[in-house]
Image (cartoon, rainbow, N blue to C red):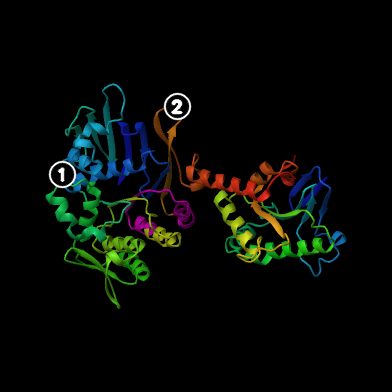
Amino acid sequence: MIEKLELTNFTAFKKLTMEFSPGINIFIGQNGTGKTHLLKLIYAVLAAHSEEKRVSDKLNSVFLPKGRYLGRLVKRVNVSSTARVKITRNGKMLSLKFTNHTADTLVWNNGWKGEKFRPCVYIPVKEMLANAPGFLSLYASREIHFEEIYADIIHRAFLPTLKGPVSIERKKLLDLIQKIIEGKVINKDEQFFLKNRGGELEFTLLAEGMRKLGLLWLLIQNGTLLKGTTLFWDEPEANLNPSMLDTLVKILIHLQRTGVQIFIATHNYILLKEFDIQKEKQDKVRFYSLYQDPGMDSINYVFGTKYIDIVPNTISEAYLDIYNQEIKRSLGGDL
Amino acid sequence: MKLVEADLEFEINGSIRAVKFDDENVHGLTHCMKAVDFVVEYEKKIFLIEVKDPQHPRSLTRNTNDFKTMLYSNELIVNVLVPKCRDSFLYEFAFKRTNKEVFYLVLVALDTLSAADLNNLTDNLKKQLPVDGPRNNPWPNKFISGCLVLNLSAWNSNFNNMQVKRLSIGP
């Protein structure tokens, strides 16, 4: 479990210390406040460990700075400066340090040595399974300009089914998703299909929302999303009809109960509200609102366990703005 | 002048007429027609006002939850808010008192309603009243010119002449 993140001069962040919930962590904030950067950073460092790769290489391939030059992830200032990243996991801290003159090496102190790592999952905004055929081989053989999260998610989806009996919790989740997608997901020759009584339907012919649920089904079925893993999901609402969001949130809350730690970035009011409504006492959900500190050239944040408590909240402000316009328009002029 | 409904007191200023409309002594037909709580008339506008106060200190928590269920399920709009508005408009129309723009305002004194909720409720109310007549064939006679669902803070920041306060909190 990821407990804490401390940043100095990393991308948009001047100084930031954040403690996480062992359950669900939800980030909101305007474009450019670094939500995706937080998700990608923690993911890259974790995935480097489970994949036994160099952390600097993984950071480079996940963030894709120009020329794979790690120093470009240091917060841009006029003088030379140093980025520091500290991540605490299960009580043990890993720290990284690199300057804006660093190409791909970093100084570090790895308190995570000897720890066990399960594969973690990053679901990018754009759905990838439909594009799986050929993508992995292309990605492996050529320098194509795609953040590695896209190849990673396909890799995770292709992992073979977990052996052994299926736990009750897992079965419940799989049933819940199967009911909605009305079938199971299979793969043949690198291509994914939804299989049901009607036959096999190519993923490319499925609505993108269904593909997302299909992906979740695969990841739960093949045991990637199990107790002790971490799920990062950037804008789960993308391409989903709002009416599907209650089910999606139900699945995520269930996953959390089985012991998956979850990080989400979102712009969607309904998704947030669903978490607020569906969470029960035992569920650990935290909302973080990232914002540009006026005059400080840095990103700051507030957090709370209730959506309504977090201020500033640009999503609520947008609704308030519409509402005030509605009032003006509905009432017309003077009394 | 002051108008009171449940635990809420309205201070009405500059109006031509302001009445507790659903008072049988004022209305006379509440046994067969639904009625909004107040009618307030200004120089250019008439407001039909309905007040819902689920956070009334004497109302039970259970009632607040029942109320929320009704509110979100559209039941309150369809079965309560819309009939009250239509009957009240008809009543005023028959008295030839709808020669100005008529607005329907619903105050829901519930702190937890967000701007998004209020937007949504306003849209639903607008659709159910309805305000424009059939699609592509709008009524030539004006019915309700506009409607809004508001909470206490939205109400007070938009109606300087009709400020409202909770009686149990005091002045």
Mark number, residue A8: none
Q: Magenta part of the protein: which range?
A: A252-281
To which quarter of the image does residue A33 belong? top left
Q: Decide if residue B110 is on the left or right side of residue A149.
A: right
Q: Are the residues under badges 2 and 1 in a single subunit? A: yes
Amino acid type at mark 2:
Gly
Q: Nearer the viewer, residue A37 or B65?
A: A37
Is B43 inside the magenta-drawn segment? no
Task: Give the image location of residue A53, x and y in percent.
Answer: 15, 44
Is A257 inside the magenta-drawn segment? yes
Using the image, name the chain to which the residue with label 1 belongs.
A
Q: Are the residues flagged by discs 2 and 1 in contact, CB closer than 8 Å?
A: no
Task: Give the image location of residue A161, x and y in percent.
Answer: 20, 64
Q: Decide if residue A57 is on the left or right side of residue A269.
A: left
**Total numbered labels placed on residues in the image:** 2
Task: Give the image location of residue B150, x and y in percent.
Answer: 65, 50
* A92 up-or-down from A173: above or below: above
- Report the residue that reaches farthest toward the top: A79
To which quarter of the image does residue A191 belong? bottom left
Q: Earlier in the sequence, mark 2 or mark 1?
A: 1
Callout 1 environment at 10 Å: few (<14), some (14 to 19), or many (20+)? Answer: few
Q: Which residue is mark 1?
A: A53
Q: Which residue is mark 2?
A: A295
Using the image, name the chain to which the residue with label 2 belongs.
A
Can residue A161 be seen from the camera position used here? no
What residue lies at 44% left-to-right and 60% top-to-bottom?
Answer: A246
What residue lies at 25% left-to-right and 32% top-to-bottom?
Answer: A72
